[in-house]
Image: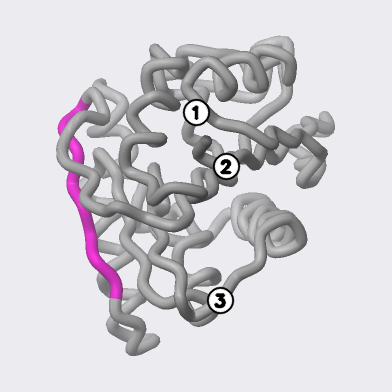
Amino acid sequence: MSDTKRFDEAAATWDSVDRRVVLAHAVVEAISSRVPLTKELAVLDFGCGTGLVTLALAPQVGSIAGADTSSGMLKILAEKAEAKRLPLRQILLDPSGGGDLGGPYDLIVSSMTLHHIADVPALFSRLVSHLNPGGTVALADLDEEDGSFHEDRTGVHHHGFPRAHIQAWLEQAGFRQVHLGTATVTHKEGQDYSVFLATAQRG
C-alpha cells in the first residue's frame, strides 16, 4: 500500500488516538513560545493531516493553508474547519509531496512530516522560496530513534533526525537564526520519543 493510500484510509479515525492529539497540542504550544503569532501572519501547515495543528493555529493568525498528499486527510480537515467556521485553504500535493504551495507566507509550520520526506534538504530549499523575506519556519519531528516508532514503515524515510543535521540543512537552504529545542516527549508502546522544534528565519 502506498503511503498516501494508507493515510487516506486512516483519516477517519486518525484523531481518535489520544497520543496524536496530545502531541499536536504540545507542538502548537512550542511554536507559540518561539514565534509571535499575530493576525497579520499568512501561514502554511505543510503535511497538515487532519489539521490538529492547523486548526489550533487558525484563530491566532491572519490566514492559514493546509497542504497534504492525502485527500482523505484534507477531507476531514475541511469538515472540521467548516464545523468550527474557520476559513482555510486546502492544498492537495502529489504523492511525492510536489505541487504549488502558494504563498508567499510569513510562517510555515510542519509537525511529524519530515521523516516521510526522502530529500529533506531539498524540501528546506523549497520552503524558503515560499516565505516572505524574514519569514519563519517552525518544524517539529522526531529526534533520531531506533526505528521502533513506526509499526508500518511504509513511506518512512528517516528514523528521526540528529539535530545537527537539521541545523546544517536549514543553514544550507539559506535560513538564519536557527534554533533547535525540545517541543515535547511523546509516549508510545511503553517508550518515550523526543520531538524537536526547529525554528529559523529566511535570510
Work out whether 59 lies above or below 190.
below
The numbered dot on residue 114 is 1
| Disc 3 secondary structure class | loop
Label 3: which residue? 38
Image: magenta residue range: 88-95
Amino acid under disc 1? Leu
Neighbourhood count class around disc 2 (C-alpha, 10 Å): few under 14, some 14–19, many 20 upward: many
Q: Determine the residue positioned at 72% across, 10% down.
A: 146
In the image, taking residue 40 as reference, residue 185 lies left or right, namely right
Amino acid under disc 2? Gln
| Foreground disc of the pair 2, 3 | 2
Res 195 visible: no
The numbered dot on residue 171 is none
Query: Decide: marks 1, 3 in contact (CB < 8 A)?
Result: no
- Give the Cα separation between the discs numbered 1 and 3: 26 Å
Work out whether 43 lies above or below 125.
below
Amino acid under disc 3? Thr
Label 2: which residue? 201
Neighbourhood count class around disc 1 (C-alpha, 10 Å): few under 14, some 14–19, many 20 upward: many
Residue toward you, 189 or 71: 71
Image location (x, y in percent) of residue 108: 45, 49
Image location (x, y in percent) of residue 148: 68, 17
| Foreground disc of the pair 1, 2 | 2
Image location (x, y in percent) of residue 2: 25, 22
| Disc 1 secondary structure class | helix
Residue 60 quadrant: bottom right
Residue toward you, 188 or 33: 33
First reached walking from the N terminus: tag 1 or tag 3: 3
In the image, residue 92 lies in the stretch drawn in magenta: yes
First reached walking from the N terminus: tag 2 or tag 3: 3
Work out whether 148 lies above or below 26.
above
In the image, taking residue 118 as reference, residue 160 lies left or right, namely right
